[in-house]
Image (spheres, rainbow, N blue to C red):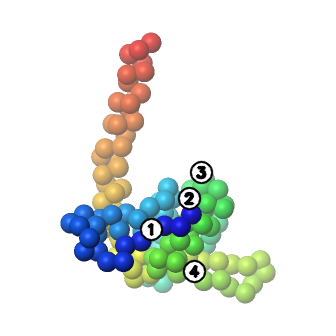
Amino acid sequence: MARTRHRSLDCSPGCAVEATLQLIDGKWKGVILYHLLAEAPEPEDALRFNALRRRMPNVTQRMLTNQLRELEADGFVHRTVYAEVPPRVEYRLTERGRSLEPVIRALKAWGDAHAKPVTASMSAPEADAA
């Protein structure tokens, strides 16, 4: 599915936010970026495909591959393929990907502070209805 991209970021005051969200949209992109930041903190550090997959047991191989390809196409992730048997593929964040660190860390902090109470409060009305 093709994504609509802005040609410039001067269309409206919130346009830069919209453009940024379009770049990192996708159910798993934020999680992939988080794991690459957490597990490969230095620019030369990388994670192999299966290491990423183990950290995200609910993602399918196809979805992980697609999300990584989109992150690579957008310049957030660098993919290195080694000519070995079996093939070894490593992913590392680019400088552009590392520039998202404060955003990803802020999303995690917000989720740590707010996601669990919302989940608990969402199940509470069901208990009251019974």
Q: Name the residue under label 4.
A: 79
Q: Nearer the viewer, residue 39 or 105?
A: 105
Question: Residue 4 occupies which quadrant of the picture?
Answer: bottom left
Few, some or many residues within 10 Å of mark 3 (<14, 14–19, 20+): few
Going by the picture, which residue comes out furthest to the bottom? 83
Circle 4 or circle 2, nearest the eye: 4
Q: Name the residue under label 3.
A: 58
- Image marks 4 and 3: residues in contact by CB distance under 8 Å: no
Label 2 sits on a secondary structure element that is helix
Q: In which quadrant is the C terminus drawn?
A: top left
Q: Which residue type carries mark 2? A: Arg
Label 1 sits on a secondary structure element that is loop
Q: In which quadrant is the N terminus drawn?
A: bottom right
Residue 10 position in % (x across, y down): 25, 74
Label 4 sits on a secondary structure element that is strand
Instruction: Indicate which disc, 4 or 1, sits on the residue closer to the N terminus.
Output: 1
Label 3 sits on a secondary structure element that is loop
Mark 2 to mark 3 CA distance (whole Å): 9 Å
Going by the picture, which residue comes out furthest to the left? 13
- Image marks 2 and 3: residues in contact by CB distance under 8 Å: no
Q: Name the residue under label 1.
A: 4
Residue 32 position in % (x across, y down): 50, 64
Q: Is residue 65 above or below residue 97?
A: above
